[in-house]
Every structure is written in structure tokens, then in C-alpha cells.
Amino acid sequence: MDAPKKKLRIKKKLSVWRYLALGYFIIIAAGSVLLILPFATKSGQTTNYLNALFTSVSATCVTGLVPYDTGLHWSGFGQAVILALIQLGGLGFTTFVSVLLMMRGKGLGIYERKIAMQTYGENFGGAGRLIKRIVLGSLSAELVGACLLCIRFVPDFGGLGVWYAVFHSVSAFCNAGFDLMGGAFGQEFVSLSNYAGDPVICIVIPVLIILGGLGFCVWGDVIDCKFNFKKFRLFTKVVLISSLVLIFGGTALYLLFERNNPEYAAFHFGQKLLCSFFHSATARTAGFSVTDPSSFSESGYLLTLVLMFIGGSSGSTAGGIKMSTFAVILMGMFAAFGGKRDVNIGNRRLDSALVGQALAIFFSYLSLVILSTLVICAAESAGFQETLYESVSALGTVGLSMSLTPQLHWFSKIILMLLMYTGRVGVLTLAAALASRKSRVSVRKPEESLFIG
């Protein structure tokens, strides 16, 4: 068989879904190799491979769960590797592949366009423009965010504050939740708690998180329609409205539930409001914190679980089941209770298959959370609340932690790694990647009814 035919056959065997899943796997493997190098740590000692792999998975899947404090354990080289993995995982390796192709003058072929569209959800004709917009928009947002964070970090840390500003800006925009504050203050896993109530940190970081969590397609539609809400696509309207409800609703509920939180005791109302806004934004996918999650009330704990499970927007740096999925399920429930045949949002009717797909995603995530919590609880001596929190955080690629991850054994860490990978690549993507490509004849069977409810 000649080379061109052999190459074509190999390419056909790798579906778009398998290409996506394999791409993330390769980046994770490469990152883990770099992180086990002795000069990747401040001590100069080689890191245990499982923990290096865990860190690489967490960074590439923009989660933030870590076995070591990033600022204390990793050297400047190790931190740079983690930042590169965050950027690759946040923007998607397909963007960089496509950019390289365009820089080499080859443009985007149908195969590359299809991969980009499966990741970012646009039409084939707009692939090149979308990718340019993703790169330029992301780098611009991260640059502006870094400049604003320099206002606080440079006076506090001098020249090193510039690196802290860049790192945290990229980590926030990519919804990763990695921080270097442990190295800055000499304390493990403090996240941004030393800046609780600080207006610069508590506004800039959440805004970057929100921008990254809205998604590239939402940006494009808002810009193309010149901020005219009436002209936005249905998807954009659903994402923006859902995001506003979750952000401001979450802020109000955190303010109510945590009014007696001991860590809020010394804060005035404005600082409490900033902290509540911060947690409402970060809980949906980012993983930063300004107060210890273990200090939350039971209501605040449950609210955080719900926000982590829902996540951000499809085609963004966020995780979770996604806001649009949640909105479709909610509208489907209202339609069913109202005895309506169609599921409508505004003046548009949704395809019935979309509701089924949304329910499949919801129950897949719920099943994975329950199963992983059950297994980890059986394998570890950790409590149920901490285990459930860590499992939802991993699958939602959030990164908020109740300090359980560093204490887990290898078996439980592997489970969390699989959850992070699944949450980033997507349940539907993995299902399609593992499915057989053999065509089957679709036969509709006789219809029957069941009693439900």
C-alpha cells in the first residue's frame, strides 16, 4: 500500500471525537514528563509520578485540584509548565494547531474545521475568523487582567508581582483556579484568602472568570450584533440570562447564608458583598477562594455543590453540565408539567432530541458523581461531605477543595483524574470516541406506554 493511501486510512480511523480525546491525553502525558524533572521543583527533587500526572491532568483540564501547593512546591520552571498546560487546556489544543496551519499558509481544511467546530460550536465558514477571535480575544483579556492585577501585586511583591499577575490572570480567564499565593505568604493552600474583601482582586478575578466562562461563540455573537440583545442568537440569550441569574442569585444567597460566617466577622457590608460575588463567580468553575470552603454553612455548602454541578457555557473554558443544558432541562420540566407537547424558549421551539440529550448529560454527570463518591468513601477514611465536594469539583473542573485531595491514596487520585478528564473533554465526546463507527440499520420497534410519576 502506498504512503498517501495508508495515511488517509489512518486519518479516517480517527474520528473527530477520538482526535479531541487523544489530543488532551497527549498534552497531559507531555506535561507529566516535564513536571517530574528535578528542576521543576523548588527542592530540586523528583516529584512522585502519580502526583506529577495528577497536577498535569488538573492543569490541562483547567480544574485546580492539586496534591501540592503550587507556589510552595513547584519552581519557576514548574510553574511555567503548569501555566502553559492551563493555556493549552483552556483555549483548546485545536486552536493552536489551526493557528500553526494558518501561519504556515495552509489555511484550514474541512477536517480541521470540523474539529474546531465540535470544540467551539460555530459553522464551517467562520472557523478561521473564530479561531483568530479566540486567540486575540483571550490574549487581550488576559493582558488587561494582568495589568489590573499588577496594581495590587506589584506593590506587595515587587518585580515578582508581574509574574503573579500574569499567572493569576491566565488561570482566572481559563477558569483553572491555580494560584501562587502559598509561595507568596509561606502558607499551604491559602488561595486568595489574604485578599478577602479587596476590591481589585474580588472584582478583576471574577470578571475574568465570567468572561472565560461565557464562551467564544457568545463573545462573537455579542460583537457581531453590536450588543443589540434582540439580534442575539437563542444560545447567546440563554447563556447571558442564565449567567446573570446564577451570578447575582448566588451572590444574594451567599450573602444570606454566610452572614454569620466567622471569617466574615471583621468585614463591613461592602466586603461581605465582594466576597459573596467572588464565591458566586468562582464556584461555577474556577476554584479560587477568599474564605475557607470548610467554614461555609450547610446551606452555603449545598449552594456551592449546585453551582459547581451547573458550571458555565458550552464552548468555553468552563466545566459542569453547562448552563444551556440546565436551561433546556428546566424548560422541558415546565413543559411536561404544563401538559405541553413542545418545549419552547421564547419564540423558538426546541428539538425534542435536544431535551433527551440534555437529560442524558445530566444523569451521566449525576451517576459519575454518585459512583465516584461511593467508591472513594469505601476506599478512604474521609467523610461523605468532603468526598462529595471533591468529586463534584473534579467532574465540574472547578478545583474548589476541602483539603482532601493531598490526603487521598493513589486509587482515589486516579478516580479524580478520570473525573477531571471526563469533565473537560465532555461525556458526549468520550461516548462518541469510544463508540463503534459501524453503521447500523435503525429499526423502530412497536410503541408502548408506561405509568410514571
Image (tube, grey):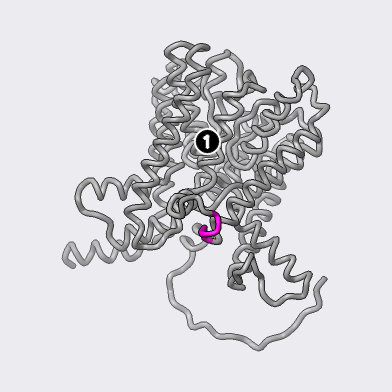
Taking 18 as reference, is 79 above or below it? above
What residue lies at 51% left-to-right and 20% top-to-bottom?
73
User: In the rendered structure, which amino acid carries the disc numbered 1?
Assistant: Leu
Residue 234 placement, left or right of 437: right
Q: Which residues are magenta?
A: 229-233
What residue lies at 36% left-to-right and 49% top-to-bottom?
131
In this view, the residue in front, 312 or 421, is 312
Residue 86 placement, left or right of 234: left
The N terminus lies in quadrant = bottom left
The C terminus lies in quadrant = bottom right
In this view, the residue in front, 424 or 168, is 168
As helix, strand or loop, the secondary structure at mark 1 comes to helix
Report x, y in % for residue 245: 68, 47
In this view, the residue in front, 279 or 50, is 279
**Residue 438 found in image quarter:** bottom left
Which residue of the protein is positioned furthest toward the bottom in this rendering?
A: 446
Taking 431 as reference, is 274 above or below it? above
Report x, y in % for residue 217: 46, 53
Does any portion of residue 427 appear in the rendered image?
no
What residue lies at 38% left-to-right and 58% top-to-bottom?
115
Residue 233 placement, left or right of 321: left
**Residue 298 found in image quarter:** top right
Q: Which residue has dot 1 on it? A: 208
**Residue 333 found in image quarter:** bottom right
Q: Is residue 232 magenta?
A: yes
